[in-house]
Image (cartoon, rainbow, N blue to C red):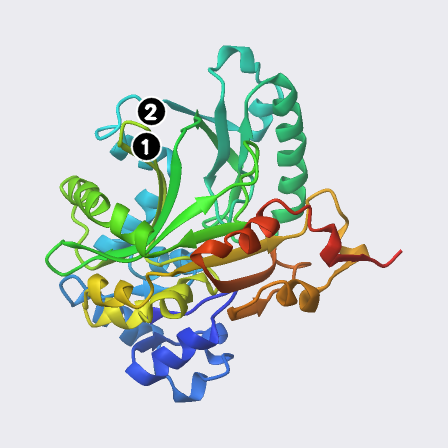
């Protein structure tokens, strides 16, 4: 069972839904999709009654906009309750405090932030929306000067983003402040199967251009990344599975591994893998169709998959327009950006006036050519931006 909702459904996901004939909730949005006529559409009553009458139904959605539909039509469903719990970052900390008791956090409204004296807090820290998406409203703060910059940025983002996503997806009314976690940031797509066992479909390391960078500029993977983190992350997910019932539960999980080897959670995005088209990287990087693997309860044969990729690096680039620029007065040079890469696996041009990103691009390089990725990681992007003034 799948709910296809705004803001974006990739061509790859649509084709998979058609090929597997996964039942799709019929909505005005899903009916507007390119391949809607080929999909196995179910009207609301049939769709939700099927879910409610099935033990541990297989449910997926490309977008957290669907949370509102679950709360309206299936509020008592186990999936709905898990989604609501994990989507709220402050509630999520309650769960993970059992695994990471040294991680502190506190929450504030926007108005409280304006009057906040950060001398009362330990620095460095990270501030983020209690409900958020795509690095919107996330800032790292190491001192008072950075706090002033972060607060100004938050107030601007509140004004710009308040009508882009529904409140259940991104709420810029309440923010969470927590300890800045040193270490390697890791992102995974995974699911708990019908037996409650974790299955990992993707492991990426999240690279940053500076200590203040909180963007989605570059996620990278390789055979070494997957082999290094797979088994330790599986063990950590097994600990999480002991805290609550998560059978048939797909999710995107971001965490950091500290120098002592401990994993510290950042966020879990429930009922979906990475947003927009980014979950498709599993196919372009590893030959794994994550939607098929979830609905058919398949596990990757990582030794076989990685055996043919031992000399490659894979990068996922999420490029946004620098926040201080007026997006209505500039143009992003998509073709020049794409031409930078020696081997582009896939790209999707986004409407950067409407969405946070200008382009998502998946690329491959030999391991000794990481510099091709690194140039973009540290770029100010001005070479790809045309000023129309």
Horizontal side, residue 145 vs residue 132: left or right: right
- Say if 29 sits above or below 372 in the image: below
Horizontal side, residue 253 vs residue 128: left or right: left
Element type where label 1 sits in the image: helix
Nearer mark to the viewer, of 1 and 2: 2
Mark 1 = which residue? Answer: 93
Find residue 103 and name its label.
2
Image point 50% across, 11% down: which residue?
Answer: 120
Q: Tell me which label, 1 or 2, sits earlier in the chain.
A: 1
Alpha carbon separation for disc pair 1 and 2: 8 Å
Binning the other alpha carbons within 10 Å of mark 1 as few (below 14), some (14 to 19) or many (20 upward) gives: many
Given residues 265 and 211, the one toward you in this image is 211
Binning the other alpha carbons within 10 Å of mark 2 as few (below 14), some (14 to 19) or many (20 upward) gives: some
Picture coordinates of residue 155, whole percent (x, y): 65, 35
Given residues 141 and 53, the one toward you in this image is 141
Element type where label 2 sits in the image: loop
Q: Are marks 1 and 2 in contact (CB under 8 Å)?
A: yes
Residue 360 seen in the figure: yes
């Amino acid at each position: 069972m799948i709910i296809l909702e705004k803001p974006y459904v990739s061509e790859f996901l649509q084709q998979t839904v058609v090929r597997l004939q996964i039942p799709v909730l019929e909505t005005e949005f899903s009916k507007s999709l390119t391949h809607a006529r080929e999909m196995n559409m179910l009207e609301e009553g049939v769709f939700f009654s099927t879910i409610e009458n099935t033990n541990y139904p297989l449910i997926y959605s490309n977008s957290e906009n669907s949370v509102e539909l679950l709360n309206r039509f299936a509020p008592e469903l186990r999936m709905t309750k898990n989604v609501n719990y994990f989507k709220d970052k402050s509630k999520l900390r309650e769960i993970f405090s059992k695994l990471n008791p040294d991680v502190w956090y506190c929450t504030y409204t926007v108005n409280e932030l304006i009057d906040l004296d950060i001398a009362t807090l330990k620095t460095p820290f990270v501030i983020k929306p209690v409900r958020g998406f795509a690095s919107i409203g996330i800032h790292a703060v190491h001192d008072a000067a950075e706090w002033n910059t972060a607060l100004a940025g938050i107030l601007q983002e509140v004004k710009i983003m308040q009508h882009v996503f529904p409140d259940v997806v991104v709420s810029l009314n309440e923010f969470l402040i927590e300890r800045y976690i040193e270490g390697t940031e890791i992102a995974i797509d995974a699911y708990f199967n019908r037996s409650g066992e974790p299955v990992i479909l993707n492991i990426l390391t999240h690279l940053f251009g500076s200590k203040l960078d909180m963007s989605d500029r570059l996620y990278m993977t390789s055979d070494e990344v997957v082999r290094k983190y797979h088994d330790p992350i599986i063990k950590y997910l097994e600990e999480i599975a002991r805290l609550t019932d998560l059978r048939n539960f797909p999710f995107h999980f971001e965490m950091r591994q500290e120098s002592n080897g401990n994993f510290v959670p950042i966020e879990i995005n429930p009922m979906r893998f990475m947003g927009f088209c980014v979950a498709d990287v599993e196919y372009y990087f590893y030959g794994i169709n994550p939607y098929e693997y979830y609905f058919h309860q398949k596990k990757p044969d990582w030794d076989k998959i990685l055996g043919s990729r031992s000399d490659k690096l894979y990068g996922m680039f999420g490029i946004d327009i620098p926040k201080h620029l007026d997006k209505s007065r500039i143009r992003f040079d998509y073709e020049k950006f794409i031409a930078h890469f020696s081997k582009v696996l896939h790209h999707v041009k986004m409407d950067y006036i409407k969405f946070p990103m200008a382009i998502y691009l998946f690329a491959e390089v030999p391991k000794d050519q990481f510099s091709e990725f690194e140039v973009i990681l540290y770029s100010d992007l001005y070479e790809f931006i045309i000023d129309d003034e």
